Amino acid sequence: MNLKKGLFERKSEPFRVFHQDEHAARDLSVQLSSILPTLYRTRPIVFVCIGTDRSTGDSLGPLVGSLLSEQAIGIFHVYGTLDDPIHAVNLEEKLHEIKSRHLNAFIIGIDACLGRLKSVGSIQLCDGPLKPGAGVNKELPEVGNVHLTGIVNVSGFMEFFVLQNTRLNLVMKMAKTMVEAIVLAEEIIERRNAISIEKWREELH
């Protein structure tokens, strides 16, 4: 759970959509696909979904992971589900496992966060690593080359209580939008990869 925004070093302004916007998933997929490697066979693309099902607000990550795992995604690797969550206790161990399995991986961290009232329900795609636990002064490893966060509730007062009382309905809707965007991004990358291979073949002749 990344409790407070602005605690990571931003190389550029985050891209933001609201989950209820008509074209939220499509717009997010275009942005996401533009930063993911086309040659995924030489640089694996890994989604690391952080959070726990013990808190409705903090369940966004593992919900995304579980929903993604149910999709027929072929080029992405997904870690962190409701069945096998990645959280503060096992994060370091899981990251070590992921990096040993996938050499030179491009990692996308996914987590819930709290923010301003007007931003609740928005999904952000940010450059640079996610810093889980930063809002509660926990020293946890940074996650990802880029990261996706969903603002699930308001920050500033009794954050853990706020997380526990976040509506699951909102979290589920945000998770579905994020998953739809990731699936669409995969389709874009596969098309781009096919075009790259075709051009390479043409150059050989």
Image (spheres, rainbow, N blue to C red):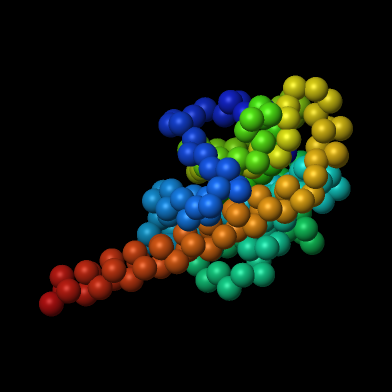
Horizontal placement of 182 versus 37: left or right?
right
Quick one: 116 or 100, which is closer to the camera? 116
Query: The N terminus is located in which quarter?
Result: top right
Quick one: 157 or 53, which is closer to the camera? 157
Percent from the top left, x then y, of residue 200? 22, 69
* Residue drawn at 61 percent across, 48 percent down: 20
Q: Does residue 43 lie above or below 5 as drawn?
A: below
Looking at the image, the residue that sits furthest to the top is 156
Looking at the image, the residue that sits furthest to the left is 205
Task: Judge whether residue 90 can be spotted in this image.
Answer: no
Task: Judge whether residue 121 can be spotted in this image.
Answer: yes
Horizontal placement of 99 versus 36: left or right?
right
* Residue drawn at 77 percent across, 42 percent down: 57
The mark tally for this picture is 0
Query: The C terminus is located in which quarter?
Result: bottom left
* Residue drawn at 82 percent across, 33 percent down: 162
Percent from the top left, x then y, of residue 125? 52, 42
Q: Does residue 27 lie above or below 197 as drawn?
A: above
Percent from the top left, x then y, of residue 133? 72, 33
Horizontal placement of 144 versus 93: left or right?
left
Quick one: 43 or 186, which is closer to the camera? 186
Q: Does residue 159 lie above or below 201 as drawn?
A: above
* Residue drawn at 66 percent across, 50 percent down: 174
Question: Quarter-wise, where is residue 187 in the image?
Answer: bottom left
Percent from the top left, x then y, of residue 89? 79, 43
